[in-house]
Amino acid sequence: MVILPDADLDQAANALMGAAFGSAGERCMAISVAVPVTDAVADALVARLVPMMEKLRVGPATDRTAEMGPVVSDAARKRIVNYIGQGEAAGAKIVLDGRRFVPSQGHENGYFVGPTLLDHVTPDMSVWKDEIFGPVLSVVRRNTYAEAVDLVQAHEYANGVAIFTRDGDAARAFSHEIEVGMVGVNVPLPVPMAFHSFGGWKQSLFGDHHMHGMEGVRFYTRMKAITTRWPTGVRSGPEFAMPTLG
């Protein structure tokens, strides 16, 4: 998610909370990277996120007050914890460390990872390059709109991206020039309605067609072309144009 200086930061922070930590980050359209433009925006965004993440209720599915549950398996938990360690070793600042999360009594053996916030992540780090698929949000700071666009364009995956801004011109330019399959404008999870195509570009697309929409229909459709003419409609003399039904 790219956050421009004119964006509503409260709205952006709320959007990131749901998009990064919904389903414990284990969904294909989770937002795992925030790209605030300018350090001032990044600092203000992080300042908003930290108390919200600290208050996030993590617990088992049996806890009706829980807002985030465990990850799917012990292997997933270990992978996520390992990525957090890789980010730390590479120089990312751990603002909130989900590895320290302590489950409630009776759930000590659950596969829990608390919400994690990594700041000052750079494109050479594995936490930027790879999909962690867990409750980890990385902040990659950029100084200008152009730098933010270049960052997105350079990634090998291109499933979904969002921009938060009040500037319609910037939103329109971003939507048209960004090489990503699904784009959200002030929408954190750019998942369209089922009658539109769903799917990414670059390495985020497998095969030749997207899902849903007309592309999904075409995938399951065998096309047939029929050209007909009835004798009562034949005009006298030869015709040299393409035949039509008229």
Image (cartoon, rainbow, N blue to C red):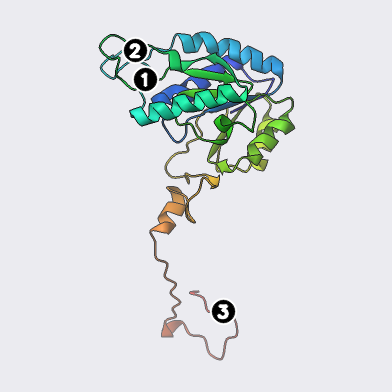
Q: Which one is nearer the viewer's eye here, 99 or 196?
A: 99
Cβ atoms under marks 1 and 2 closer than 8 Å: yes
Secondary element type, mark 2: loop
In which image quadrant can residue 181 be found? top right
Residue count near mark 1 (Cα–Cα under 10 Å), binned few <14, some 14–19, many ≥20: many
Q: How far is disc 1 from disc 2 in space, using C-alphas? A: 7 Å
In the rendered image, the residue lying farthest to the bottom is 237
Residue count near mark 2 (Cα–Cα under 10 Å), binned few <14, some 14–19, many ≥20: some
Secondary element type, mark 3: loop
Residue type marked 3: Met
- Residue at label 3? 242
Residue type marked 2: Pro
Q: Residue at x 72, y 29 (%)?
A: 145
Looking at the rendered image, the disc whose residue lies closer to the viewer, 1 or 3, is: 1
Residue type marked 1: Phe
Looking at the rendered image, the disc whose residue lies closer to the viewer, 3 or 2, is: 2
Q: Residue at x 37, y 15 (%)?
A: 58
Left or right side of 205 for 140: right
Q: Which one is nearer the viewer's eye here, 62 or 81?
A: 81
- Residue at label 1? 112
- Residue at label 2? 103
Secondary element type, mark 1: loop
- Provide residue 66's location: percent of width, then percent of height: 34, 14
Q: Is residue 55 above or below residue 220?
A: above
Cβ atoms under marks 3 and 2 closer than 8 Å: no
Left or right side of 11 for 37: right
